[in-house]
Amino acid sequence: MEKKIDEKDLTNRVSMYFFSPLKSPNEYRIEYKLKYGESHIKKYGGLRFSPLYLLRKDVYFCLGSYGLSRKNIGQNTESALFAGILLINIAFTNLTNKLFDKNYTLFAKKYMGIEREEELKALRLLRNALEHNNYSLFYRYRDRDKKTLIKIYFSINLRFAKLIEKDVTWKTKYPSELYKINPRKLHMSLEKGISRLKIDILKKGSFIYKKFIKNIRLKDWTLWDN
């Protein structure tokens, strides 16, 4: 027999999990205390910060999307593009692992508008290049179908018209590919996906509704004293 859902608790949990990253940690604390009393906070060892809120806030700091002023997001936004990409990947991976059983293609297509699997793969390889290849913009991987070692290059620029695009004119004497990526458009895609996801979670009885109840547990959220 399934445990009865406390609808108020669920609504509060959804509200705080998707708390706007454009609001300050102090605003988060105020809202949290309005929704949860002192006994609740004591039960969970203190006020719990949504890990998604903290991640999104840091992505905004790095990329400064939606025309935010530098006063609000830090001084050198362009110098943090690589960090922003890594944080977006963490948010994307965590959401997919928790709510979609690691079906990255499903989340990317349905919520972020990334239709082509090769583009999703390229974004993953960009993360590998930054994290595992000395913070660089190239990565070698072995194509299982062609059984060939391919070198993937990445060009990162906020002026690119598309989120991601393969350069079909790119040619080298060895197997390689070049992908152009706009980190800010990638960020916007993630934010739109999160907004759509929140709407779907609140549809009672849906697959994602049940996954959220089961896997996004308040006791796993972050205790942060800053």
Image (cartoon, rainbow, N blue to C red):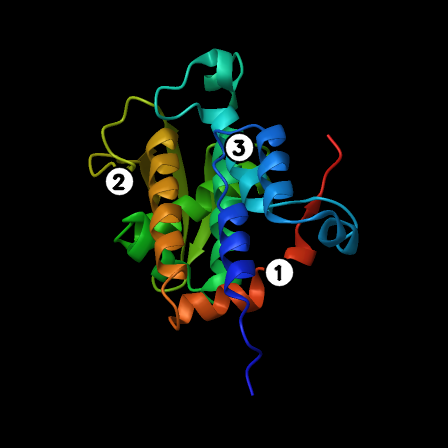
The image shows residue 46 at horizontal and vertical percentages of 76, 46
Q: Is residue 182 left or right of residue 41?
A: left
The residue singled out by tag 2 in the image is 166
Q: Real-space Cα distance between discs 2 and 3? A: 30 Å
Residue shown at 38% from the left, 40% from the top:
191
Identify the amino acid type marked 1: Arg
At mark 1, the secondary structure is: loop
Residue shown at 76% from the left, 53% from the top:
39
Q: Nearer the viewer, mark 2 or mark 3?
A: 3
Instruction: Give 212 or 155, whichever is nearer the viewer.
Output: 212
Q: Earlier in the sequence, mark 1 or mark 3?
A: 3
Instruction: Give 148 or 71, whichever is nearer the viewer.
Output: 71
Res. 81 visible in picture:
no
At mark 2, the secondary structure is: strand
Q: Real-space Cα distance between discs 1 and 3? A: 20 Å
The residue singled out by tag 1 in the image is 217
CA neighbours of label 3 inside 10 A, class few (<14), some (14 to 19), many (20+):
many
Instruction: Give 216 or 153, whichever is nearer the viewer.
Output: 216
The residue singled out by tag 3 in the image is 57
Count how many numbered circles sit on residues in the image: 3
| Image quadrant assignment for residue 27 | top right
CA neighbours of label 2 inside 10 A, class few (<14), some (14 to 19), many (20+):
some
Task: Name the quarter where the C terminus is drawn.
Answer: top right
Vertical placement of 111 versus 162: above or below? below
Identify the amino acid type marked 3: Lys
Vertical placement of 114 versus 191: above or below? below
Name the residue furthest left.
169
